[in-house]
Image: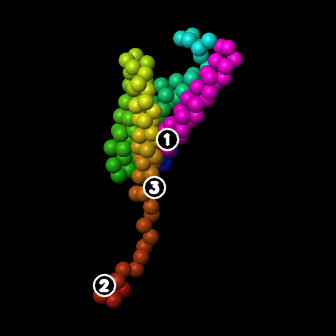
């Protein structure tokens, strides 16, 4: 279960990196399309935006939820806390996306910054497994110069 926890945490982190690539691809495609005369309006779609939407609204939230469930069984020190943090940051990320479209586009900046927070929290969650699962090697202890 610890391996599953680690893999899920790192998959969330990888998802954030893929999201950055998706949105860059989306906007460079949009700019290229505009340069070619394409009208970008509410009906405009491109592959990058589609991939960003699928990853952000389905894949990453499911990974974060599964990570949270696995955390209850993985016996990772503070694993539930870190998995809950990942899940909470994902929920905030989705909320910020909706608010950026529905309230003010300025909230899109917070969406981008929160993505960096999600990257950090998910990497830390995965890293905690490695720090706490190192096998202890037997050592010879001495007490006042005597081998015990």
Q: Which residue is mark 3?
A: 130
Which residue sits at x=43%, y=36%?
Answer: 113
Q: Residues within 10 Å of mark 1 (few under 14, many from 20)?
A: many
Q: Identify the disc placed on residue 13.
A: 1
Query: Mark 3 and mark 1: span between their CA atoms?
Result: 16 Å
Query: Mark 1 and mark 2: span between their CA atoms?
Result: 46 Å
Q: Secondary structure at mark 3?
A: helix
Residue 126 point in image, percent of width and height: 45, 48
Residue 15 point in image, percent of width and height: 52, 36
Q: Residue furthest left?
A: 144
Magenta stretch in the rendered image: 9-38
Magenta stretch prevailing secondary structure: helix
Pointer 3 or 2: first along the chain: 3
Q: Quadrant of residue 43?
A: top right
Q: Quadrant of residue 138?
A: bottom left
Q: Nearer the viewer, mark 3 or mark 2?
A: 3
Q: Is residue 45 left or right of residue 132?
A: right
Q: Is residue 23 left or right of residue 62?
A: right
Quarter of the image that includes the C terminus? bottom left
């Amino acid at each position: 279960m610890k391996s599953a926890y680690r893999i899920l945490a790192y998959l969330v982190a990888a998802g954030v990196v893929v999201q950055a690539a998706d949105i860059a691809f989306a906007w460079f495609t949009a700019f290229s399309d505009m340069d070619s005369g394409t009208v970008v309006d509410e009906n405009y779609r491109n592959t990058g935006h589609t991939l960003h939407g699928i990853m952000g609204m389905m894949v990453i939230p499911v990974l974060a939820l599964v990570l949270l469930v696995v955390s209850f069984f993985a016996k990772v020190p503070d694993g539930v806390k870190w998995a809950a943090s990942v899940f909470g940051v994902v929920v905030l990320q989705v909320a910020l996306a909706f608010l950026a479209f529905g309230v003010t586009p300025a909230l899109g900046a917070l969406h981008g910054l929160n993505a960096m927070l999600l990257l950090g929290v998910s990497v830390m969650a995965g890293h905690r497994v490695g720090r706490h699962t190192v096998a202890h090697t037997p050592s010879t202890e001495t007490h006042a110069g005597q081998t015990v």
